[in-house]
Image (tube, rainbow, N blue to C red):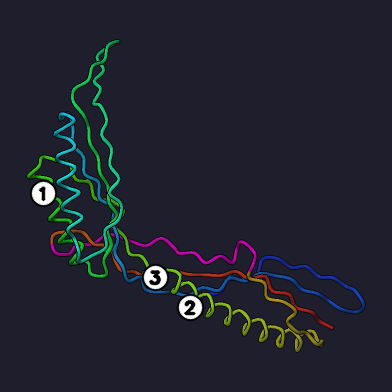
Amino acid sequence: MQKMFFLFLLSINFLYSQTEIIFSRTFEKKIKPDTVTTSVGISSQKLSQEKTIEKLTKISDFMNSIKYLKVSGGEYSVNPHIVYDKDKSHQEGYDGYISYGISSKNPNDLNKLIRDIQRLGDEEKLAVTISSVSWQIDNEKQALALDNDSLRLDAIIWAKEYANKLSYKIKANCSVSRVDFTNPGSALAYTAMKAETGFDRAPVPIQDEQSIHATPIITLVCR
């Protein structure tokens, strides 16, 4: 469903019996996301450096073996665990951390991997953090190109129809001089979405439609 918002800029130039009208208008469409994504972080505390690296390597090997969905990242860190006591400090082993980005078109697959990671984390006595679970649009460039072309067409058609209506109302000959999509406001953008429901023992965000919009600057000339 398309939504449009009222213009906010009007500039009139009287020159050689010609009136130039400049304004902007927002055109919006709803599109359905098709890929659920999340970020996973696994951490250890107060282990020896050797043991920390050993546990992070187990996590890395496990994640590298995943073939049924997309896994990215794998950045890790190993830092001294420093304990502060009044004016003194001392080291108690090392803290380790490794993180991944995960995406899948099937929430069941993502939930399965999350449970497998949590199970492995329990076995290795590691803390597992799941964050930023949300629906996104796969193949973003292609989706943006398709929707952008559609919104451009909507804007041009609307501008021509508006020019005809304005011609009738003010008893003049109005035409579209320019529809400019290069202004910053015309960049396509997505709205935030809700993300709270349960599915198969793990939370999954609601697959709400997302908003994509463009705000061109339209120039009409009336004679």
> Which residue is identified by label 1?
120
Q: Is residue 199 magenta?
A: yes
Q: Which mark is residue 139?
A: 3
Q: Amino acid at mark 1?
A: Leu
Closest to the observer, 84 or 176: 84
Screen quadrant of the N terminus: bottom left
Closest to the observer, 127 or 99: 99
Q: CA distance from mark 1 to mark 2?
A: 42 Å
Q: Amino acid at mark 2?
A: Leu
The image quadrant that residue 141 belongs to is bottom left
Q: Earlier in the sequence, mark 2 or mark 3?
A: 3
- Is 142 above or below relative to 123? below
| Left-right relation of 120 to 193 | left
> Which residue is identified by label 2?
146
- In magenta, the rendered stretch is 182-200
Residue occupying image coordinates x 52% and y 67%: 188
User: In the displayed image of the protein, which residue is found farthest to the top?
Assistant: 87
Please name which of the two marks, 2 or 3, marks the residue nearer to the observer. 3
Q: CA distance from mark 1 to mark 3?
A: 31 Å
Q: CA distance from mark 2 to mark 3?
A: 11 Å
Q: Earlier in the sequence, mark 1 or mark 3?
A: 1
